[in-house]
Image: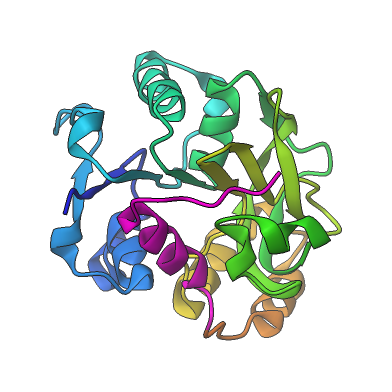
Amino acid sequence: MKPILIMKTGSTFTELAHETGDFEDWIIAASGEAPGFFTIADGVDEALPSLDLLSGVIITGSHAMVSDGGMLVDLWSQLLRDAVTARLPVLGICYGHQLLAQALGGRVADHPAGLELGQVAIEMAAAARDDALFSALPAQFPAYASHLQSVLELPPGSFVYGSSDFEPHHAVRFAPAAWGVQFHPEFKHRIACAYIRRQRPRLRDDAEMNALIKKTGPLPGAGLLLQSFCHLAKSSRFSYGD
């Protein structure tokens, strides 16, 4: 079985990584798959593998901003465009979702209302029931979020399947086998709370921070999307929605 590439676009806070592992570890844990089912590369320390050696691509989150650009963003974007052309399954998470959107012709910038943080309510469109990936998600569900930037303009041919009151583009299918989510299916409760605490300087006061932490509860189905994506990547056939 060909592995799934976890395209590593950043790392979490050093102290949190020591306690819980890094972005790729959270993705692997939430997927339910063995670590050997994945290969991890960032294009710097580890060269990005040839697409014909892969069964899919998952793009991690990052503390960087997609709109800052740079040589690595260009490198990652070209790989993603090639993967979409080849109909290799691709899933972008948070920064990865934004990177995928920008690579395909969308626009990413700061969200006009600022930061979305903590546990948020996602509502899926009725059409998601017919999507190969998003059909795995319920019509409404809670998810963890932590982002300042958003996909403000979608690339041509995109379909929006999920949103929150704050963020209109939480779940998007960008191409027949390319999906992105602004929320974090790989986060666990402990990780979500750690991100709220680290964002304290952007909040009004400790009371707001504590209210966000209090609102944030364990989400037992948080990894469902990653499990479903891995199942799709293993499949030899796909059934796409309209």
Q: Nearer the viewer, residue 238 or 107?
A: 238
Q: Which residues are magenta?
A: 221-242
Q: Is residue 230 magenta?
A: yes
Q: Position of residue 190 (x, y in %)?
A: 46, 78
Q: How many marks?
A: 0
Q: Residue at x 75, y 75 (%)?
A: 207
Image quadrant of residue 25?
Answer: bottom left
Left or right: residue 233 compared with residue 148: left
Q: Nearer the viewer, residue 240 or 29?
A: 240
Which quadrant of the figure contains the N terminus? bottom left
Is residue 160 depicted above or below 157 in this figure? Answer: below
Left or right: residue 107 compared with residue 87: right
Is residue 234 depicted above or below 138 in this figure? Answer: above
Q: Residue at x 69, y 28 (%)?
A: 109
Inspect this view and state whether residue 186 appears.
Answer: no
Q: Residue at x 67, y 23 (%)?
A: 106
Q: Position of residue 104 (x, y in %)?
A: 57, 22
Q: Residue at x 31, y 42 (%)?
A: 8
